[in-house]
Image (spheres, grey):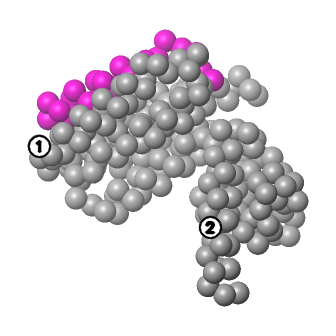
Amino acid sequence: MNKLDTKVSKTLADFAYQKIRRDIIRGELGASEKLRLNVLCQKYDIGMSPLREALARLIGDALVITEGQRGFWVAPLSLDEMIDITYVRSLLETEALQLSIENGDDAWRERLKQSYDALSSIESKLDGRHRDLVPEWEEANRTFHETMVSCCGSPWMIRMLQTLYQQSERYRRISIVNVQSERSVHDEHEAIYEAVMQGNVLKACKLTELHLRRTTDAVKKTLSLNT
């Protein structure tokens, strides 16, 4: 394979990876669903080689599983996994948040303000009538949480938190789209933001821990309704 063919194959694999990942996150490819390669080739208009490369990446993301020569499946949703992800993320995120508050400067606080304002703008419209905004909300939510911990001084901690955030994305979408409750995610974000900007480490960390736990509780509620 020459360099041009290699570049084209990589581009196609990236395309397939992004599309399949999006459809898994959105639930268009359901949890535990068998992934038939010939169907996926037709659906995404892609060849077998780049498709297999994309699936290999998704296995690395824990969004797809495989069993020997039997094929590929969308990874199942597991409440135990969600609880574990939340527990580990809570430990790391509160530690990183504390360090960021201690190390953060005016430039960091300005970035945090910008990310919070962008998130608030979307959350003001995110209800049953605007569920098409969920992908935009997801990006703004990720930016807000990543900005909060961006001054922790530990690249490895940031990298691990990014991985945990991605792993919980399917579950988080369930809590946003499917659960009708008295919970106001925006109010939770606002309280965390204000505590961080005030430099109140203890309050910011406790609110963050509660925020993550409430998302897990919302997912529990949805999964119990579907069983």
Measure how far apart labels 2 and 1 are at the Cα level. Answer: 40 Å
Task: Report the label total.
Answer: 2
For the C terminus, the quadrant is top right
Q: Amino acid at mark 2?
A: Thr
Residue 2 higher or lower than 12, as above or below? below
Find residue 144 and report its horizontal and vertical position in percent.
Answer: 34, 39
Q: Nearer the viewer, mark 2 or mark 1?
A: 2
Find residue 42 and report its horizontal and vertical position in percent.
Answer: 84, 55
Q: Which secondary structure, mark 2? A: helix
| Residue topped by disc 1 | 106
Q: Residue sitting at 14 percent across and 50 percent down?
A: 103
Q: Residue sitting at 69 percent across and 52 percent down?
A: 20
Q: Which mark is residue 11?
A: 2
Q: Which residues are magenta?
A: 178-201
Q: Residue sitting at 82 percent across and 59 percent down?
A: 41
| Residue neighbourhood size for the residue with mark 2, other residues' Cα within 10 Å, grouped as few (<14), some (14–19), many (≥20) | few
Give the mark nearest the N terminus, 2 or 1.
2
Q: Is residue 164 magenta?
A: no
Given residues 57 and 115, the one toward you in this image is: 115
Find residue 84 and report its horizontal and vertical position in percent.
Answer: 52, 46
